Image: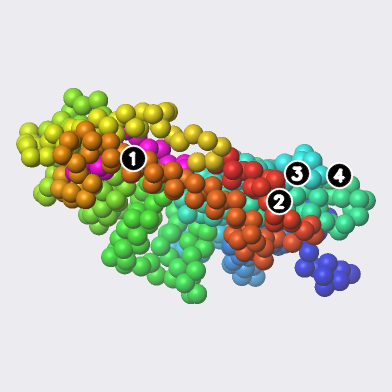
Amino acid sequence: MLSHSEQESFNIDCLLAKLTQCLEAQPDKVDLRSYVEAYDELYKLFMALGTLFGFVASDVRDKCDILKKYLTEVEHYSSVEGMIEYEMAEDLITADATNGCRTLLRLHRAMPFVARFLERVHAAGENDALKKHGKEAYDQTLAQYHPWLIRKAVGLAVYSLPTRKNLLNIIAGETSERHEYVAGVAPTVVSRLDAVFEKVQVLYSEKSLLDLPWNPFTFVSDQRMTMDGDNDSPPISDQEKVRIASDFIQHAPPGEFNEVFNDVRILINNDALLKEGVSASIAQYNKEQLIPVKVQDAEIPSLISDYNDIGGGRFYDPRSKLSFKVDHLRKEAMDFQGWSADSKVESWRAALEEEMTSYVGDHYRGMVSGGAFGPSALIMDQDVAKKLKFVAYCACMCIIMKTDEIQSAQELTRIICDAENKYQSAIVENYHTMSDTTFKALRRQLPVTRTKIDWNKILSYSIGKELNRQ
């Protein structure tokens, strides 16, 4: 009889037994009760992976609880085959958002992740950090089913994974004998996981059930969205969908707009509503991010922003003396027309452009800042020069203007250079003080590994080295 503490901890023998029963309890069928009980053990494993994996464990628990309710109907839900046959015959798969087939599919998709992760843990060195192995296993399996937000959450969660040794301490105890025993059983567990997965995969494939739809805008009663959004609450209105989607788009990280937009498109599941509802948000995002667009017959793209917005959806490019409209989704300029520059400031603008082009070429070769640790933003020629052109056109340069255009341009460039030096120096200084501030604040958030961290030497740890490379 297991003690209470043993009942609450992951037991690899129990997992192996339940996986074996999945395949052997009923001739030529997958035993559903054993399948759910195997996931009860996997739930404990997810809990052992650290606090940040709690949302994964919670979702597994929700799915298991749903299936356990169906298990009371022994006649129809004793096996996966029986469940599929019954729900298809009664048309429950499309009528009920929490049907057994759809719920099981979410667990089914997670099984290869567990197998590939355990495979990598088995092959890892005793003191190896598992974040790389966890990320590789996730990218190979579950990532294809998850929207951008969840992929980012998992990308953060893997940093909380312990070392191989500490994970074994948590799930098997601290004796070397137990570690060796778990290591010996692990390949058999992986083999059983793969066997159960393949059998269920064939069943779902034969019935065309591998792509059952889900409603990501459905929330459970406590207003928490599950990993796949499955539940039986009513979906929110189109207006609320547009509001949420617009907020996602406006807060998309630089360089990841396409990933966010593709996920938003899946969430909305209505291209007409998406185009009508979030087009203004996309346009505003592009202007705030100073998105470059290719201008007709011009070598250097033009930035779009509030500063060169002349109304009516048109923007101007002083370099080529053209105005144009923008397809904000494709990020393409079109409908080019001639545009007359302000002759009063054109000579000043041209001088500033020439000076800044030279500055960018000297300081941002290859379009990045040099040094062991520098800003990750890519600054292109037109990025810097264009921003300053707009300032010139505002005629606000009187505070530094000299009588000569070239001298004024050089003075502006010097001010920019000084500001950039201060900015990059501040980044380096703040990074080196993170061991006493940010990382120390994370102390209570990181999992217990039974190994004290010397926060004054955080740069020598793997997480510090990885951040330094980025």
| Residue depicted at 15% across the width and 39% down the height | 403
| Residue annotated with mark 2 | 457
For the image, the number of numbered tags is 4
Label 4's element?
Answer: helix
| Residue depicted at 42% across the width and 28% down the height | 366
Nearest to the eye among marks 1 and 4: give it: 1
Q: Amino acid at mark 4?
A: Gly
Q: Is there CB contact under 8 Å for labels 4 and 2?
A: no
| Mark linked to residue 128 | 3
Q: CA distance from mark 2 to mark 1?
A: 37 Å
Which comes sooner in the sequence, label 4 or label 3?
3
What's drawn in magenta, residue-wise? 375-392
Which comes sooner in the sequence, label 3 or label 1?
3
Furthest toward the right, the residue is 177
Around disc 1, counting alpha carbons within 10 Å, would you say few (fewer than 14), some (14 to 19), or many (20 or more)? few
Q: CA distance from mark 3 to mark 1?
A: 48 Å
Which comes sooner in the sequence, label 2 or label 1?
1
| Mark linked to residue 414 | 1
Which comes sooner in the sequence, label 1 or label 4?
4
| Residue annotated with mark 4 | 184
Label 2's element?
Answer: helix
Residue 387 is one of the magenta-drawn residues: yes
Q: Is there CB contact under 8 Å for labels 3 and 1?
A: no
Q: Is there CB contact under 8 Å for labels 2 and 1?
A: no
Q: Nearer the viewer, residue 345 or 328?
A: 345
Nearest to the eye among marks 3 and 1: give it: 1
Q: Amino acid at mark 3?
A: Asp
Q: How is the image coloured?
A: rainbow
